[in-house]
Amino acid sequence: MPIPRSLPRTGLAVAAIALAAGLAAASPAAAQTKTVYIGMNGGTMEKTYTENVFPAFEKATGIKVVVVPGTSSDILAKLQAQKDNPQMHVVFLDDGLMYRAIGMGLCQKTEASPVLDEVYPSSRMKGDMAVGVNMGMTGLAYNKKMFDEKGWAAPTSWMDLADPKYKGKIVVQSAASSTFGLHAFLMYNRIQGGTETNVDPGFTTWRKTIGPNVLEYIPSSAKIAEMVQTGEAAIFPLTPTGVGSLKEKGIPVEYAQPKEGSVVLMVGQCVVNKNPDNAAAQKLAAYLLGQEAQLAALKFGAQIPSNTKVSAPTEVADAMGKFQGYMKTANTVDWDVINEKRPDWNQRWNKEIER
């Protein structure tokens, strides 16, 4: 816009200031930067996303992403405390806790977008109130060195946990403290004719079938590496990713997909209900489900994509192909029932199984 030559010096100064202000307002770079806060696990996940995923989103949108780190339990507690005045826009939670958050009214529906048609159907929770952002599954892992030495074939069924030849060689994470152990119990319960609403078949028979084979019920998977190296553990519930991590450390383990199927285990994301900037929150949520973000999370953080269109790099293409094959028989569990019944189950597990 040309400045009229007839303006006096004071008028010229005013016009110049007005022009500069107008240009500044029109410039995206000069516009006030929005900030969205996302709750997620700290450590490796936070590093992966802050260094390799969020920068491309920030560059494309001008929206800055700040991580609020913590475990899923920590993040859920913060969400509850901030329910009437949320400070976070998007959160990542383990699937069991995500269903709890949805039930508490802490999440809102993910807006429709093309990426929702690209993710695994099993990753879409409660009518898209949350969506899995990375995938996993609980199946069986086994001590490859021990199996080779004894000439044993790889496990093929959850019921291999009850095979007498593994007496004193089965390790199971406690169902009262570990999702892996809970998944193993629920699959055994289904094989015995039970469901999440009827766990009597599992509880009444576990001690007579699998129980005699169990060397130890452990609170988490932290001891698995040691117990494989000392030759104590033959078979144990674990994820393909967990097996991969152990193999990278030189631990001789392999993953086996049970014929009855594994159990889906995922980290879900939800857009926080009543968050301070819903448009920005929904934009970030859609980006994180897209191929660009999920490929970066796979390459730099070994996060298994929920987006089925992601083309895996050559070095992990075989592993991804196997995982996608496993997903064809993977089972989902009813987390609404589990969350309601878990305290009673925990008491029963401690009294009837681990005693």
Image (cartoon, grey):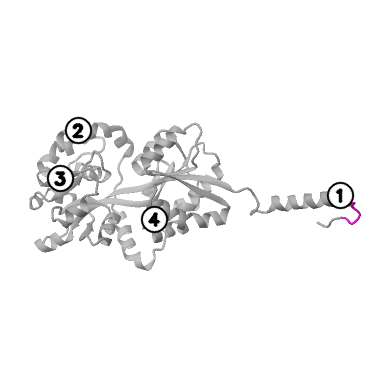
Q: Amino acid at mark 2?
A: Arg
Residue 261 visible to the viewer: no
Q: Is 19 on the left-hand or right-hand side of 187? A: right
Q: Could you tell me how far apart the alpha carbons at marks 3 and 4 are, in whole angstroms?
A: 33 Å
Q: Amino acid at mark 3?
A: Glu
Q: Is residue 38 magenta?
A: no
Badge 4 local density, few (<14 within 10 Å), some, or many (20+)?
Answer: many
Q: Residue furthest bottom?
A: 314
Q: Helix, strand or loop at disc 1?
A: helix
- How would you classify the magenta stretch by its main secondary structure? loop
**Picture disc at residue 216:** 3
Badge 2 local density, few (<14 within 10 Å), some, or many (20+)?
Answer: some
In the rendered structure, are the residues bearing label 4 and label 2 in contact, judged by CB atoms less than 8 Å apart?
Answer: no
Indicate the position of residue 79 as horizontal and vertical percent values: 44, 36
**Picture disc at residue 348:** 2
**Picture disc at residue 11:** 1
Badge 1 local density, few (<14 within 10 Å), some, or many (20+)?
Answer: few
Residue denoted by label 4: 305
Q: Amino acid at mark 1?
A: Gly
Badge 3 local density, few (<14 within 10 Å), some, or many (20+)?
Answer: some
Q: Helix, strand or loop at disc 3?
A: strand
Range shown magenta? 4-8
Q: Is residue 6 magenta?
A: yes
Indicate the position of residue 235 as horizontal and vertical percent values: 17, 53
Q: Is residue 90 above or below residue 56?
A: above
